Amino acid sequence: MKNKIIGYTAGVFDMFHVGHLNILKQAKEKCDYLIVAVSPDDLVKSYKGKKPIIPLEDRMRIIESIKYVDEVVIQYDRNKINAFHKYKFDIMFVGDDWKGNDLFKEVENELHKYNSKIHFFAYTDKVSSTKLRSILKKEIK
């Protein structure tokens, strides 16, 4: 991987939609090798209070089939510094809904020490897994 820009992003990727595709495509345009970490059900439940609708194995199969993705891994915890030390990425891609968040300010400062950085992408407003879940609940009633 010498002289290649390694990118990293992480997410749940539940009910895969165009917003997910946009982030992966835009990330790949800014790196040579894109690692995508997918959160397991128990981790998602611990911080979102709900389990994903699509099981982890299926979400990983979907992500690994996307042409922009070079490697799929499991995100066992949300510690981005640990992820950096494990994968040695040059740039981490995050939705801009996290910009200004204290956690990411701290991560950004730490990554800077290693010449790595965070790139924030615009959140796709029109669609999200949360919006899809809400629509499904209304349709089922």
Image (cartoon, helix red, strand yellow):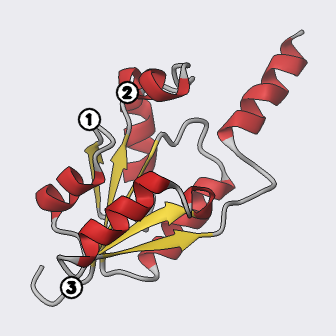
Q: Residues within 10 Å of mark 2 (few under 14, many from 20)?
A: some
Q: Position of residue 30 (x, y in %)?
A: 42, 83
- Measured in 3D between alpha carbons, the distance from the residue under mark 2 to the one under mark 3, in whole angstroms, is 31 Å
Which residue extends farthest bottom?
3
Residue tagged 1? 76
- Amino acid type indicated by mark 2: Leu
| Foreground pick, 8 / 104 | 104
- Amino acid type indicated by mark 1: Tyr
- Closer to the chain start, of discs 2 and 1, is 2
SS category of the residue bearing label 1: loop
Between disc 3 and disc 1, the foreground one is 1
| Quadrant the N terminus occupies | bottom left
- Amino acid type indicated by mark 3: Lys
SS category of the residue bearing label 2: helix
Between disc 2 and disc 3, the foreground one is 2
Residue tagged 2? 43
Q: Position of residue 132 (x, y in %)?
A: 75, 35
- Closer to the chain start, of discs 2 and 3, is 3
Q: Position of residue 92 (x, y in %)?
A: 36, 67
- Which residue sits at x=26%, y=70%? 111
- Which residue sits at x=47%, y=21%? 45
Residue 126 picture quarter: bottom right
Q: Please say if 56 is above or below 106.
A: above
Q: Position of residue 121 (x, y in %)?
A: 58, 70
| Quadrant the C terminus occupies | top right
Residue tagged 3? 4
